[in-house]
Amino acid sequence: MPELPEVEFCARRLREWTTGRRIVDAQAQAGPPLRDLTPEAFAVGLRDRRIDGVERLGKQLFVRLDGDATLLVHLGMTGKFVREHRDAADRAGERARLALDDGRSLRFVDPRRFGRLRLLATPDVPLHPEIASLGEDALAVCARPGGLAAILRGRRPIKVALMDQSVLAGVGNIYASEALFAAGISPDAPAGSLTPDRADALALHLRACMLESLEREKDSEIAYLHEGGAENPFRIYGRKGEPCPACGDPVRRVEHAGRGTYFCPRCQT
Ligand code: ZN
């Protein structure tokens, strides 16, 4: 499932492929990932627009178009963009495509259809409920000493707080698990109980885990764990029952807010 590094990777590729290009044709299937849009409105709204840039906040992507329009993209659970020659056959799970003026087309591929594509007037974007509710981007918060300590409050488990998009935008299950392991912090520790030093250490690890993952993505498209073939690159995530890389005890899996948390009870206190 995409988290901040995968979305940032997607933003970088899209920027490289599309900035300054014009959309000559747009097509989409009815239903998800289109939200509040018919395929006709998608086609009419995007055709003949120039792509001026691509930005990211948390897991949200903003494709800036001329004429003060923004294509708001969320990759959902399995979404990604791929670039093909304009006449290439459909990709499996393809839901939408944008033909560009360089003879290529961008395909939005999303087998499980949890992705979201919306077309908004740019001034309305910050007011959209999905955007208005977001906290600050996790990479920015974690780059600032004291940044994480300032927003972690209360008695709920730290794992749950890290994944709350209204507190910290971009962190999901994988990087919350990885960073808590790296920092030696129990996923059940109350969010507000961390000393400033421990919160800073957690921020450094969280940022490092995300940047490391971003570094690993060298191909032109994201390889998700669920697609198979990709080896699990994580130290603790997805490794239930395997030996902890630090102490050798078996890695445990519990659930927080319905999501699997992987941790080592001996190393994380
Ligand atoms: Zn351990």
Image (spheres, rainbow, N blue to C red):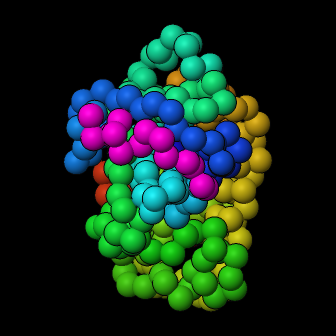
Quadrant in which the C terminus appears: bottom right
For this rendering, which residue is in front, 166 or 131? 131
Residue drawn at (63%, 74%) of the image: 140
Left or right: residue 174 versus residue 254 is right
Q: Quadrant of residue 37?
A: top left
Q: Please state the horizontal and vertical placement of residue 33, each as a whole percent of the image.
A: 32, 38
Residue 86 among magenta residues: no
Q: Please state the horizontal and vertical placement of residue 142, each as a whole percent of the image.
A: 64, 74
Using the rendered image of the protein, determine whether residue 261 is visible from the camera's viewpoint: no
Q: Please state the horizontal and vertical placement of residue 256, each as a whole percent of the image.
A: 36, 57
Residue 52 among magenta residues: yes
Residue drawn at (35%, 51%) of the image: 119
Residue drawn at (52%, 64%) of the image: 57
Using the rendered image of the protein, determine whether residue 206 is visible from the camera's viewpoint: yes
User: Which segment did they paint magenta?
Assistant: 40-53
For this rendering, which residue is in front, 243 or 98? 98
